[in-house]
Amino acid sequence: MNLSGVLIPFVPLLGFIINGLGFPKVSKRWAAWIGCGSVFISFLIASVLFIQSLTGSFESTTISLFDWIVAGNINVGFSFFIDHLTLIMLMIVTGVGFLIHVYSVGYMHDDEGFGKFFSYMNLFIFFMLVLVMGANFVMMFIGWEGVGLCSYLLIGFWWKNREYSAAANKAFIMNRIGDLGFILGIFLMFITFGSSDFDKVFAGSSAFATNDHVMVAITLLLFIGAIGKSAQIPLYTWLPDAMAGPTPVSALIHAATMVTAGVYMVARSNILYSIAPISLEVVTVVGLATAVLSALIAITQSDIKKVLAYSTVSQLGYMFVAEGSSAYSSGIFHLMTHAFFKALLFLGAGSVIHALHHEQNLRKMGGLRKLLPVTFITMFAATLAISGFPPFAGFFSKDEILVATYEKSPAVFWILAATSVLTAAYMFRLLFLTFYGEYRGGHHQHEHIHESPRVMTVPLMILAVLSTLGGFLGLPALFGDTHWLSHYLEPVFAANTRLTEHSESSLLEIMIVVLTVIVIAVIWWWCNEKYVKKKVAPAIVEDQLPLWYKLSYNKFYVDEIYDRVIIKPLEWMGDFFYGKFEANVIDGAVNGLGRMTVWLSGQLRKIQTGNIGFYVLSMVIGIVLLLIYGLSKMNLF
């Protein structure tokens, strides 16, 4: 158990080392085998442990490798912790990660940095596995920072494009803002508990009263880290820009793994958050606001990857609303189904972009249903899943979140239900603009459109199956006591004595099913009337747009507001301190001392005349002055 558990993160690390040091000497064929094979081996090991957990021969365990930081009473071990929640995350990270690696073999085949790309991808998988396997918050923070570094490397992979490099910088810097809150939370843990180990922190927290100010502070600081990493308001604007990276990067980092780190962290820290209901309220409000705002933006975007990016931000908001409602297992359930259908949507979008020679504008697509049949069918399944259409995976996880929020706050329920309607609207809009109507690109380009190779379509098919059937792992109470995932995760939350119990409402679940079907039917009709029958995408003339459309199309000017309110004042302050304070005060003082030294030396140099009589007189005057000083010290005057 110990050896196999340790191998899970370190096999991808070995793949990174081989491909990284061997690039460009390692051939593309071997780079692909090493990159994909290392993740597949980790998936096999995780699968063995997962099967053991199903048969009852598995127990939660901590694997301690060595003492890493020892200072006084502080001891931070380099150790891993594996329980049922860890295993679920391991299956998602390695399973979906492997499929994305395989897909990348076809998508990146002609790229000159093929081997380097796979080395970065392997390094990312390593850090993500460290994040979910860490036995303490410091180990989690290592993975947390590592995936941030890898996101910078992968988003800016095509670094010769300045816009892509700027997007990588933006992602890195905005994540650092959140990470500052995370590490301050860890410092406060050491002050409070003397440790960051999960077992010691969670056990020690039981002594605190509800909404104790220390627990509120710790949980809010940790959540600031989650806001940055999981792209929530106000630190969400980096994720849409991160679409500058290759499409497999978008699928891996921004759908299945990195951005879900914040959701995992809150679920792992469920005991702390249950002690601080105020923090849970903050989590709910931030998640709800993010879900609504990003859905409103997604509905008017023209870039196929930007639509999916804002969709990711919105779905992450869903997960945080679930956890803010104390439905932690529901948040993990949606994290899992989202990994299936969002990875599929990104990879499907990549297949479209690959076929259209890197065209991403939805208004220049259309009519691809017969030309890209596998891509169409799989993306159609993913669209139904994310829209919450039964019996696809997204329906069950979203339904569960809605039921949990209704019990806590009907207002939150109705707002989230409206967001679900928006999700169906922008996803079917994307589907129709891409695959229906007539092709709106160039004639020459149309003649060369063809389906992607099998190395790209087979992962799409597997993800389509998971997006279709994955929801059956969490059937609602309407079907009896059949929620497998909830039962599987029970040991994870067993120690949380303040966990809020959620009742099930069969009537509410039936109502959600009926409303979902009606809404999707209406959206289908609306999109068909607006986009398919007209056979052209309506032109965008900003001066003629309704106010709501203009606000949505321009992303509510959030980036522009940040630029005016934060960036411009900081640049002005920088210019002021550089041009005025540094040039006149600091440089003036330094240069003034230099000029004074030159002036004094020039004045002293004038007394070096070569006149011996003057030198003798100066010596006598000096001796007299020394005698007077000495006698005065002896009190003889």
Image (cartoon, rainbow, N blue to C red):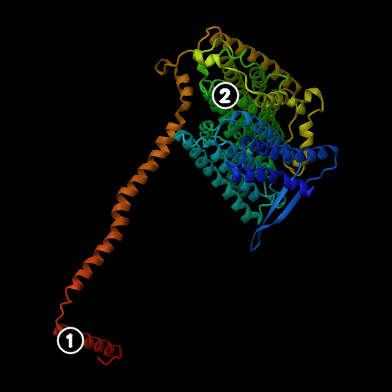
Badge 1 density bin: few <14, some 14–19, many ≥20, Cα 10 Å: few
In the rendered structure, find residue 142 and report the number of the disc placed on it: none
Q: Where is residue 144 drawn, in percent x and y?
A: 61, 44
* Labels 1 and 2: the sequence-earlier one: 2
Q: Residue at x 42, y 39 (%)?
A: 566
Q: Nearer the viewer, mark 1 or mark 2?
A: 2
Label 2 element class? helix
Badge 2 density bin: few <14, some 14–19, many ≥20, Cα 10 Å: many
Q: Against 28, is 616 above or below?
A: below
Q: Against 288, is 63 above or below?
A: below
* Amino acid identity at mark 1: Val
Q: Where is residue 361 drawn, in percent x and y?
A: 51, 21
Q: Nearer the viewer, residue 408 or 224?
A: 224
Q: Where is residue 125 drawn, in percent x and y?
A: 65, 40
On-image quarter of the C terminus: bottom left
Q: Against 37, is 365 above or below?
A: above
Any part of residue 206 in sight: no
Q: Nearer the viewer, residue 386 or 35?
A: 35
Q: Quadrant of residue 615?
A: bottom left
Q: Where is residue 132 drawn, in percent x and y?
A: 68, 43
Q: Residue at x 54, y 14 (%)?
A: 446
* Amino acid identity at mark 2: His
* Cα–Cα span, label 1 and label 2: 94 Å
In the rendered structure, find residue 354 and report the number of the disc placed on it: 2
Residue most extreme to the top:
533
Q: Residue at x 63, y 50 (%)?
A: 138
Label 1 element class? helix
Q: Quadrant of residue 11?
A: top right
